[in-house]
Amino acid sequence: MRLPEFAGAFYPSTKDELKAELNLLFQAKTEYYNNALGIIVPHAGYLFSGQVAAKTYKAISGTKKRNFVILGVDHQRAGIIATSKEDWQTPLGTAKIDRAFSDYLTKEQAIIQDEFALKKEHSIEVQIPFLQYLFKDFEFIPIQLPNISYKEILELAKLLSEENYFFIATSDLIHYGSSYNFFPKESLYDPNDYVKNLDNEIIKQICKFDGKAFLNYTKDKDLTICGATPIALLLEIAKNLRCKKIEKIAYDTSFSSSHDASTIVGYGGLVIF
C-alpha cells in the first residue's frame, strides 16, 4: 500500500477536511463532456490550482469509464518511466491499481515498476482525491514520465492507446520568477498578465493536436512547463483513438491566491474528446 506523502501539504490531511474542501471546489459551474477521452489538469496545491482541476474533473464526471491512466511528471528526476503495482491510500480511502494493465505494461519493459521513484512524486497523488470524490469504483495506472524523445512518446502512445481507458495528463504551465530562472524583461511591467498571455499561446499550441510540434515549441522558446511530456503523450494517444477536439475548461494563475508577482505559475484545464 502506498501511503499519502503529500496530504497536509498539497491538500488536507483528514477525511473531513478534504471532503469539505472538495465540496467547495466542485461548486464550480462547468460544461459537461461525457464523451471525453482525456483531460489536462494542474498538479499544484489545491489552494492554488484546485479550482481549475475541480472544474475540469467536473466536466467529465458523466463518463462511463472507470479505468484511468494518470500521466505524471518526474519532479525528482528519477529518469525512468515508472509505474506502481500497489494500491494508493488517501484520506478518502484506497484507490485500487489496475493490476492487469500494469502487468501488461511492465512486461513490455518500457515501463518499470518502481515504488520508490513514485513515492516522492506529487503530480499523480494529488489527482487521486478528485477521482475518489467523483467515482465510487475505479482503478488506475500511474505513469511517471521523465523528459523523453518524441520517438519514445510515439512508442508509449501505441502501447497505451486502449479504447476503454480515460487518460489524465498532469502539467502546470509557465513557471515565472527568479526561482525558476524565468523573468523576461518584457514581463516586468505586469508579470501576471505576461504569464496569462504566454499560457494562452501554449494552449493554442496544444489545441493543434500535434505532440511533436508542441514539444518543439516548448523547447525552442525554452518554456518552463513541467509537464510537456505528459501533454505530448496524451495528444498522440488522442490521435490514435480518433479524438477531434480540445476545449479549454478553466484557467488561472497562482497570483489569484498568493498575490505574489515575484513567483507565478499558470494552471490550465483542458478536455479532449
Image (cartoon, rainbow, N blue to C red):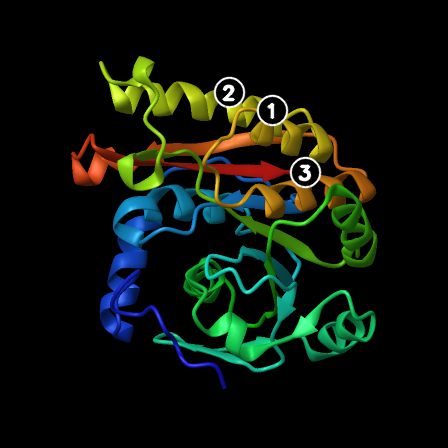
Q: Nearer the viewer, residue 24 or 149?
A: 149
Q: Amino acid at mark 3?
A: Phe
Mark 2 element type: helix
**Residue denoted by label 1:** 205
Screen quadrant of the C terminus = top right
Residue drawn at x 65%, y 63% as measured from the top left: 81
Residue drawn at x 66%, y 55% as measured from the top left: 166
Mark 2 or 3, which is nearer the eye?
2
Give the crowd class for mark 3: few <14, some 14-19, many >=20 residues within 10 Å. some
Residue drawn at x 31%, y 16% as measured from the top left: 185
| Mark identifier at residue 273 | 3
Q: Which of the two discs, 3 and 1, labels the residue nearer the N terminus? A: 1
* Left or right of 108 on screen, residue 1: left
Q: Which of the two discs, 2 and 3, labels the residue nearer the N terminus? A: 2
Q: Is residue 215 above or below residue 148?
A: above
**Residue denoted by label 2:** 201
The answer to the question of whether label 1 and label 2 lie on touching residues, with beta carbons closer than 8 A, is yes
